[in-house]
Image (spheres, helix red, strand yellow):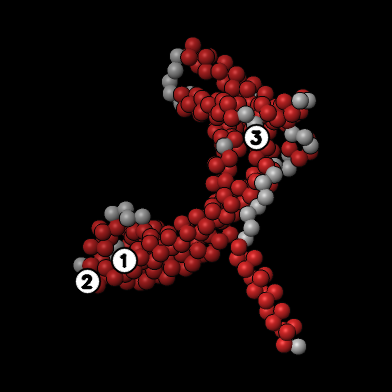
Amino acid sequence: MDLNQRLQSIAQNRLFEWTAVSVIIASALMLGAKTFELSPRTQGLLEVADWAITIFFVFEIGLRFLATPEKKRFFTNGWNVFDTIVVAVSLIPGGGGDQVLVARLVRVFRVLRMVSIIPELRILLNSLIKALPQLAYVLLLMFIIFYIYAAIGTTLFETINPVLWGDIAVSLLTLFRVMTFEDWTDVMYETQEIYPLSWIYYLSFIFFTAFAFLNMVIGIVVNVLDEEHARAKAEDDRLAGVEAPVDNRALLEEIRALREDVARLRER
């Protein structure tokens, strides 16, 4: 086994991956601990531990880079680029002013490195990103419903409570409150004193937004997540040399088409 294969075995080792996850969790806990008032000695220990974590991250990213057979392909992966930037900026020494502020902010993003290490989290995030184009149309339709109901609410309820229904912008915020069920019954009871049937307005709005559109969003995300899991499994099977399963539907369609061609030839 050559050096490159040894580095690959180490980088892909589950123990090494979970060690990196543990270090990231420790980094997150240290970040939270620094928000409390600590003694100078404790602060000094945290600074030493922070630099030890940074050194481990440099070692880990360097090991992954050296374990890549084609070094140029390492930076074609967006997560590798993200990890490299975070680790590189983490090396900024804690001076003063904006420099130390940038260093602290980057240390916050070190927690996101857990996504690049755990494949399941990568699949989940990739699914959410790929679902955004489809979700955009759902959000656009939801905004249209919001706008229509806000216009109706401003027209009918402005005189009842100008604070909640004074203009269309405020009405949009009030409807968002209704959609999230934040004391929405208080808003409804207030308008019911003047318009007894205004409950139809609120219940229909909740049905369209909180129930119908929310289920559409969940359905889109779940569908994209299933496709991403299937794609990841196919990629793992390809790397492992496992043949992809035969698509029975496609095979049946091909057999049906061949039978039709044979029947046409016999008729001639």
- Residue 2 visible in the picture: yes
Task: Specify few, some or many for label 3: CA neighbours under 10 Å numbering under 14, 14-19, or 20 or more.
Answer: many
- Going 76% across and 88% down the picture, which residue do you hit? 268
Q: Residue at x 77, y 34 (%)?
A: 69
Marks 2/1: CA–CA distance: 12 Å
Q: Nearer the viewer, mark 2 or mark 1?
A: 1
- Give the x, y percent position of residue 91: 66, 25
User: Which three-letter amino acid code belongs to the residue tagged 3?
Assistant: Asp
Give the label, 3 or 1, closer to the camera: 3
Image-based side of 222 in relation to 174, left or right: right
Q: Earlier in the sequence, mark 2 or mark 1?
A: 2
Nearer to us: label 2 or label 3: 3
Q: Residue furthest front?
A: 266
Residue at the bottom extreme of this rendering? 268
* Local SS, label 2: helix
Looking at this view, is 89 or 122 the one in front? 122
Residue that label 2 marks? 196
Mark pair 2, 3: CA separation:
59 Å
Q: Is residue 199 above or below residue 110?
A: below
Q: Identify which amino acid the numbered label 2 is placed on.
A: Pro
Q: Quadrant of residue 157?
A: bottom left
Other-residue count near label 1 (Cα within 10 Å), few / some / many at <14 / 14–19 / ≥20: some
215 vs 194: above or below? above
**Residue at position x 29%, y 70% in the image:** 200
Residues at discs 3 and 1 in contact (Cβ within 8 Å): no
- The residue identified by callout 1 is 202
Q: Amino acid at mark 1?
A: Tyr
Q: In the image, which disc is placed on residue 83? A: 3
